[in-house]
Each structure stands twice: as structure tokens, then as C-alpha cells.
Image (cartoon, rainbow, N blue to C red):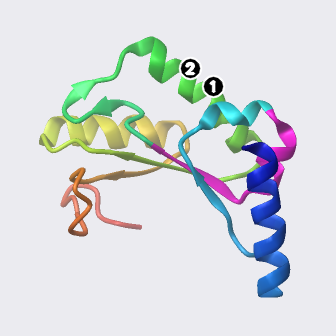
Amino acid sequence: MVAFVKNISRYARAKSGQPDFRIFVQNAEELSRHPDYVQSVSGIGKEDLFYNGNQRQPAAETGYSIRQLDRFKAAGKPVLVTDYVTQPAKIDDFYKQARSRGYVPYATRRDLDVLTINRSHPPD
């Protein structure tokens, strides 16, 4: 997978003629243990980091993912997190936790069929 993503990144940047063409990977944050992988992408998106629906993720699972995602942050790459929480207090908690880590949060419906604007957390 590491070689595959690196090849896609090189190809997209060469084909587009834009060396800063952005490549964002989704999930599979454990691949961050490969520094060349982290360097070959522009950032990462992670789903269900703090919540799975309106249920809290197990602390060990969240902690593991955060350690991996922080490798992207340490390399200066944005970390985008999407949790599918729908209860106001949990939405607030999700945004607070994500922002405290320097991640870019988005709480929405799992169907992803509408753009969700959370009134207490408008887009920047």
C-alpha cells in the first residue's frame, strides 16, 4: 500500500504538472510508521476517531489512532477528522477534542448526503 500511494502521488503530480498537487489518504493511519509514506502525501483524513456514531470509541483505540495521526502532524501535514455524531453535547465534545489536538474536525451524518453546518461550530 505504501508503494502504491507513493506511485499515485508521483504520477498525479507529474501528470498534472503541479508538483504541489495534493494527495490526501483516508484512514489506515498505521501506515504512518513509514516516514516515506507520510512525506509522499499532503495529509490524512480519519473517520470515527472519538465516536462511532453517538457511541464513544474505546480509549485504547482512540489513543492508538492519535499516536499514528500525530506523526502526520509532526511532519506538518493536516489531519482531517470526521465523526458521525448527531447529539449536540457529543458534537461539542468531538470538536473540542479534535481542535485541542490541532486536527480539523467535521461532524456530520454517515450518509454524507448533505453538507452539515453545526451552528455552534461554523466553518472557518
Q: Amino acid at mark 2?
A: Tyr
Horizontal and vertical percent position of residue 101: 53, 37
Residue 39: give x, y in percent of width and height. 83, 51
- Residue at 22%, 26% (x, y): give it: 55
Amino acid type indicated by mark 1 = Arg
Q: Which residue is mark 1?
A: 67
Residue situated furthest top in the rendering: 60
Q: Secondary structure at mark 2?
A: helix
* Residue 19, visible in the rendered structure: no
Q: Quadrant of residue 85?
A: top left
Q: Is residue 27 left or right of residue 2?
A: left
Q: Which residue appears farthest toward the bottom when viewing the image? A: 17
Q: Nearer the viewer, residue 39 or 76?
A: 39
What are the residue bounds of the magenta stretch?
34-46
Instruction: Identify the residue under disc 2.
Output: 64
Q: Could you tell me residue 56's position as x and y percent? A: 27, 23
The reply to whether callout 2 and callout 1 are in contact (CB within 8 Å) is yes
